[in-house]
Amino acid sequence: MIRIYCLLLLILFTSLSFADTFKGFNHEFSTYVAEQLKKYNIPGGAYVIVKNDKIVSLETFGHIDNTKQQKVNSNTVFRLASVSKTFASTLTTMLAQEHVLNLSDPITKFVPDFSLAKEGAAEKIQLKHILSHSSGLMPNAYDNLLHENWSMDKIIGRFDRITPICQPEKCYGYQNITFGLLQPAIETSQDKSYSTLLSERLFSPLNMNDTSIGFNAFKQHINTAKPHVLRKRVLTKKKDKQGKRIRKYVWRTVNVVPDFYKVAPSAGVNSSISDLAKWLIANLGHNPDVLSPALLSELTTPRIKTKRNMRRKYWQDYLTDAHYGYGWRIYQLDEQKVIYHSGWVEGFRADIGYSPELDIGFAILINAEANVISQISSKFWSQTDKLINNKHE
């Protein structure tokens, strides 16, 4: 009885200790985010921090567009861009663990018209290589064609002009179009659409009610953030604390376009900051009936080294190693591992990550093409050493 009482006291003390530490941490961080978004004149955004299976902080900033008639709230829907890959990889790996499909299957089994310039090379690319961006193709192959009025069939037909730069699993080359080929692989394996499967297997079980997939779904949402691109930078007469003249960033609202929606597994998901909190909690292991421990382990196993990320702006001062798993990046920051992904599509940026060790997750969304989001995310994870030290005390 005494041992149980002591254990309960220890749990309570640890919880209070974290709460006290986090309160100061979050106040400082929230102020920092607000300052950075104001500095770059970001129209609107939101971030969330989760701990264990709870939201411990959710902040929203600004408006859905430059008219400033509607504020961003916790249910405002943004485009997730490449953060969509975390959902596609989860569904694909889930189906593989259920033996519905095999990650060692060649992509040509599902997309027989896919071919490369070198004979037999396409047949060597397996689903697992697509999931880990280790197909051997040059990075971002034919992404430029997504902006054209081309069908996916026509774009895929262009791949017979590409010669691989390495054998599969031998080098990293980030892809969008080939990652999109996971959709026909999934749909060929059973009689359901990709969007239906995402809804049935992930969105609905996790109560992600703001989350959808596709261009039409985004347009049908009432509460959506509008995309913004940089119009100009104006050098003002005002000066910062270092005496340098301050630049004013002027953003232009643009229309949402269907280009990258053509590759739904790569960039087709729309969601809110509230729903990303649910996604983080599930990936931290708190919804094992939806995302099993075995599934999470397979998704986050390092598959290919990503050396270029070691030089990534804002992150390079903190990263000690970087890999890609299945639809997730694995970043090593000294003693902690962060499972992470970013997204960038016209007018939107998104970042999401979680630390299995700390049982903490963080996501941020903005409706402008500004790299300040990387600055904020790297700042968050570099500052969590305070929480690590608290945990170890």
Image: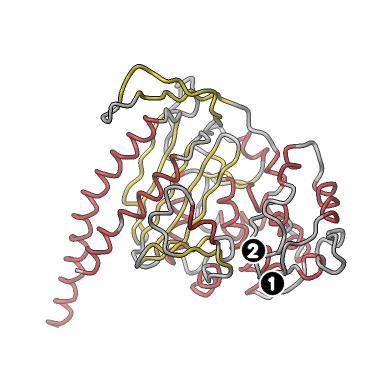
Q: Residues within 10 Å of mark 2 (few under 14, many from 20)?
A: many
Q: Distance of mark 2 from mark 1, alpha carbons?
A: 9 Å
Q: Nearer the viewer, residue 365 or 70?
A: 365
| In-image side of 31 versus 223 (left or right) | left
Secondary element at image label 2: helix
Amino acid carrying label 2: it is Leu
Q: Within the image, what quadrant is residue 306 found in?
A: bottom right
* Residue 131 - label: 2
Q: Within the image, what quadrant is residue 165 found in?
A: bottom right
Q: Pointer 1: what residue?
A: 103
Q: Nearer the viewer, residue 215 or 135?
A: 135
Circles 2 and 1, Cβ within 8 Å, touching? The answer is yes
Secondary element at image label 1: loop
Q: Nearer the viewer, residue 23 or 144?
A: 144
* Residue 239 - label: none
The percent position of residue 16, horizontal first and vertical second, equals: 18, 60
Amino acid carrying label 1: it is Leu
Q: Is residue 279 above or below residue 284?
A: above
Q: Is residue 349 above or below residue 305?
A: above
